[in-house]
Image (spheres, rainbow, N blue to C red):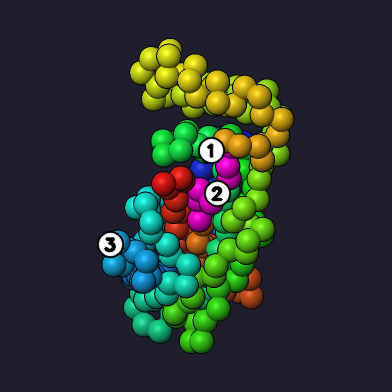
Amino acid sequence: MTGKLDQWIMGVAWLLAGLCGTASAQSLDRITLNAPELSAGAYTWDAPGARIEESLEPGDEIYGGTLNLTPRGGPGGEYRVRVQFETSLGISGEGPHVDLIDFRHCVSEWHVASSADGRRFTVPTPTDEESGCVPRATPDEIRVAAREALAGWSDTQETTEHWLGLIKDIKSPADSPMYSTISEIRIQVEARVDGRWKPVTRLVFAVPMGC
């Protein structure tokens, strides 16, 4: 599994390649996301670019929310929205936690969002298997990843050794205090151009792990 930087570079390159073939009639003037469990109430992006990154607040959910597309300069063309979920591993400290977001992941298939009019799309909810998928990794790999993650924020060697001590006896990534949960949601807006779906905008939501 490549790192987040490699994923970002590949994703942007792919989107830009697709955008080259997207006619201006398929450009969007605005995207709005409304969801009952959003602390901000709604997100609005004017003249959205190829990639937009957002960080959800703890407790926020966008599942079941409505994504509204406003085409630029008129009714626009035909659109579809697809959604993908990604899980990551974490180490629970019964409150505090260490997130291994740059380690291994489970990545779901793309889900086509339902729509009654081609402008308002409902964000799907992940299945239990998708939201609880445990990325594959050996105990030694997990310990190495944990040490690397701790190097980014642990202020003392004592703190680092405390967290590493919690996972010294694990036999698999499913053993306590390890856990897995959704860490990223990707929403891709596509337009039909010359009979093919072309990417217009990708929304990437970082999801807080743990409590």
Which is closer to the viewer, label 1 or label 3? 1
The residue that mark 2 highlights is: 181
Crowding around mark 3 (Cα neighbors within 10 Å: few <14, some 14 to 19, many 20+) is few
Which residue is at the front of the view, 129 or 115? 129
Q: Amino acid at mark 2?
A: Thr
The mark that comes first in sequence, 3 or 2, is 3
Measure the alpha-carbon separation of dots 3 and 2.
Answer: 22 Å
Q: Quadrant of residue 109?
A: bottom right
Q: Which residue is located at x 41 percent, y 39 percent?
A: 95
Measure the alpha-carbon separation of dots 1 and 3.
Answer: 26 Å
Q: Amino acid at mark 3?
A: Ala
Q: Quadrant of residue 165?
A: top right
Q: Is residue 206 above or below residue 139?
A: below
Measure the alpha-carbon separation of dots 1 and 2.
Answer: 8 Å
Segment tinted magenta in the rendering: 178-185
| Visible residue check, residue 91 | yes
Q: Which residue is located at x 62 percent, y 43 percent?
A: 105
Q: Quadrant of residue 49?
A: bottom left
The mark that comes first in sequence, 1 or 3, is 3
Q: Is residue 169 magenta?
A: no
Q: Which mark is residue 90?
A: 1
The mark that comes first in sequence, 1 or 2, is 1
The residue that mark 3 highlights is: 40
Q: Which residue is located at x 50 percent, y 70 percent?
A: 123
Q: Which residue is located at x 51 percent, y 57 percent?
A: 186
